[in-house]
Amino acid sequence: MRRRTSKLPALPDDVFAAVLALLPPRSLAASRCVCKAWRAVVDEHRLLLPHLLPHVVAGLFVNYRNRRMPRFFVRPASPTARIDDEFNSLAPEEASGVVTDHCNGLVLLSCRDRDRGVDDLHVCNPATRRRTLLPPRAGDEWDLKDYRVLRRAYLAFDPATSLHYEVLLVPPGPTLEQVDRSSGRMRWPPSRWAWPKFSSRSGRWEETVFVRQGEPAGTAQRLKLGGLEQPVQSRYRWRYAAYWLGALYVHCRGEFISRLSLSDDKYQAIQLPGDLPEGYEYLCSFLGKSEKGVYFAVMDHENWNKHLMVWILNDQTACWSLTHRVKLKPSTWWEGYYDYVGKLKLWSRSLVDAYTGEEKRVLLTKRNVDWSSDDEDVSDLTDQECYWEQEVDFLGIHPYKEIIFFSAYRYVGVACHLNSGKIQCLGIYAGGTYPAVNGSFVFTPCLIGD
């Protein structure tokens, strides 16, 4: 007897897409190979895109003043085998480089060409091992300068909206002669502010003039170096940036925030929160992006205990709200200041080479040499008192959780969980010579884009 077969009614694409969205990433990728119709549903509903976009923290790139290249420190279960964490694909042995910025999986690397005596800018994707060497700007003497000291470069990239990126160079500021001629009345930044900008869409540099909306930050004389008595043209003190909702927020010379809207070429000068000037001896600050937008963190360590204050910026009003105030008393960050070798975890096995003899043997026997900000190994320091050293550096802000990374004792990485006020010791991030940190960037892998 012939069996009758009935054709099942086809599910609507929206319903079928909702079913496929329940699959894990590998199974979802395999489903694209079933037939053209399935592949079309996956692609049209962009089901794989969230798995390719940045969504986890893989580690931190840290620059050191006495290291040829930055070091990358990983978290457990991070796909480090697929990450070009040493930039071997582009940096020759005789070159040196620093990470100048990171944005949603792309890394901006300034690499010194010793033969020409200039810095080249590379846009790298360590997850895909792809990179692009940016062309120089013809006729601009500033391109012969060091991007890591005299001029900062910033990266703007959002793979959720476009696979193209933009790189912006900080324009030269006013000269001492210009400031003196104005008798201290020159207002800064100017109403029309020209920034050199490279677009991956056009493949060339252009000058973008941003038109100011609102008032300037102040006079050039007051803003020139945040209270430190140094000339305007000495070391440029440009800080970190955050790319949020199509705008680049730049911490300008430690004095104010510039919000550069890349869609309509307008900008706004935003005053810093709090009353302490950047030139204040015991103050360090950091600008970054986290789950609720643009964050500004300040560490005030005038006394032996540190006060961490965190503000969040309201995009509409350009006003800051103080959301976290934590008194840090990190006496339990480790067990004994001098007995650290057997007690702290290294962030990278490459740091073992900085030690010799018995210290190196002990470190080589350690099983866990990386870090995690997601586990429960945190310490509640509410009732603890301790001695603090002055060497404290911000290492970054977690882009998806309210966690701030910073250093203690010059070579110990620490995570502060803002919502609970608890502290987590991550491990050692510097070798035996304790080099000074020259910038740190939280890295979130992106499997699409350059």
Image: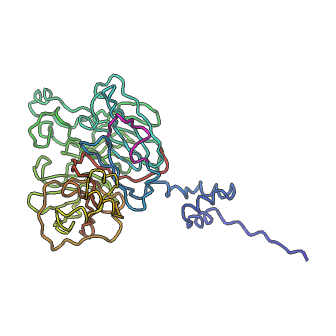
Q: Is residue 444 above or below residue 66?
A: below
* Front-lying residue, 41 or 135: 135
Residue at the extreme right:
1
Q: In the displayed structure, would residue 234 be above or below residue 353?
A: above
Foreground: 59 or 100? 59
Q: Residue furthest top?
A: 139
Q: Nearer the viewer, residue 52 or 390?
A: 390
The residue at the point 30 percent across, 37 percent down is: 211
Name the side, left or right, on which 38 lies relative to 183: right
Magenta segment, prevailing SS (helix, strand or loop):
loop
Residue 262's x, y, as percent? 37, 42
Q: Is residue 238 left or right of residue 51?
A: left
Tell me, what colour scheme is on the image?
rainbow
Q: Is residue 369 above or below residue 251?
A: below
Determine the residue positioned at 36% across, 32% down.
120
217 shown above or below 414: above
**Bounds of the magenta span?**
84-98
Q: Position of residue 100 (x, y in %)?
A: 31, 42
Closer to us: 392 or 186: 392
Which residue sits at x=15%, y=74%? 383
Can residue 315 be seen at all in this image of the molecule? no
Location of the N terminus (image quadrant): bottom right
* Quadrant position of residue 294: bottom left
